[in-house]
Image (spheres, rainbow, N blue to C red):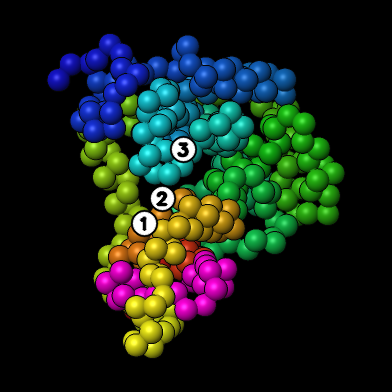
Amino acid sequence: MMRIKNIPENISYEELLKLRIKDLPLKIQGTWLAECVDKLYAELEAKGIKFKPECYLADEWLAPDGEPVVGIPFFLAHPALIKLEKHMMLDVEGGTKQWCMQLLRHETGHAINYAYRLYAQKKWQQLFGHFHQEYPDTYRFRPYSKNFVRHLEDYYAQYHPDEDFAETFAVWLTPGIDWQTQYKGWKALHKLKFIDELMRKITEKDLKIKKGSKFWQAVKLTSTLHSYYKKKKAQYAEDFHDFHDVNLKRIFPIPADERNQLPLASQLIIKYRRTIIQSVSHWTGEKKYIIDGLIKSLIIRTKALGLVVSDSEPLEIMKLSIYITTLMMNYMYTGRLRGKK
């Protein structure tokens, strides 16, 4: 299979999914991503920082461990791929300029940390922790903690010392934020002041690592888009079987002799599916496609059980939304919807 010159405007999802990622005509130059990267470089220059990480198209948002470069998801480089991502995952991470800039600043925090090996400094370790500690599979965050800045969703600064530094750097770099006032009285302010002082010092120092390796480059990904999304979804997939049955029967209880007179619970869920996804995603910070996968399994089980709606629609949707939110929070804390066996 050869690299294609362009992606037709009217190409179907089915045709697009057959293509290999490495064969797609993708680049940052000439796209809206180039504008975002230029803006990032301008923000760094405005802060007196000479370092400007090389940005490239990768399989996801990342700064490879120890490498002073920034990977941007390949699907953001073409409108057809943005639409496909939205279709497959229900959301496009970094799909708006504001969101893209947030992620670029975050990944640049990693890149500058690696470029100057800042994590080796004693003060860095005192404030953020041990850089080389293992990343946990999941993390239990404290929503109201004032030890960490709030930048990306999921209270990501609480995940790992390296993420804490990247998030704090991103807040410090963001134009228009009065972080001294916003974080007054927070312990996180000490981290911000440390970065403010540190960035003034490194402008006079040489890079410890001048060139980084660009891992997981789009131009080297041999998998098809179909395989890419199959793997991407599988990372969060879980086999539910009849796990939900007992709880669904409690949400939609009804005597057997009255079933034929009432609307199906599955139809109610379908009717409010998008509203539930939007609400649960907003309050939990969980990705929409994960919530959607759970809802699809609930639709299947309510159909199989023949469950019907006996209370008012608002009450039934409230009960169901609380149940789904509880499952999502359990998933975020334990890595499983059902908890430990």
Give the position of the C terminus as an image quadrant.
bottom left
Identified by mark 2, the residue type is Tyr
* Mark 2–mark 1 distance (CA, rounded to whole Å): 6 Å
Let me know if residue 72 is in the magenta part: no
Dot label at residue 293: 1
Q: Answer with left or right where residue 290 lies relative to residue 224.
A: right
**Near-viewer residue (279 or 120):** 279
Amino acid type assigned to the residue bearing label 1 in the image: Gly
**CA neighbours of label 1 inside 10 A, class few (<14), some (14 to 19), many (20+):** some
Q: Is residue 339 above or below residue 130?
A: below
Residue 55 is situated, as x and y percent measured from the top left of the image, at: 47, 23
Specify start and end residues of the magenta stretch as a single range.
Answer: 301-323
**Residue with the most extreme left position:** 1
Horizontal side, residue 265 vs residue 316: left or right: left
Instruction: Determine whether label 2 and label 1 are within 8 Å by CB.
Output: yes
The residue lying at 41 percent from left, 22 percent from top is 78
Image point 68% across, 39% down: which residue? Answer: 171
Residue type of the residue flagged with mark 3:
Val
The mark found on residue 289 in the picture is: 2
The residue indicated by pointer 3 is 92
Q: Under tag 1, what secondary structure?
A: helix
Quarter of the view holding residue 193: top right
- Residue 64 placed where, x, y %? 42, 35
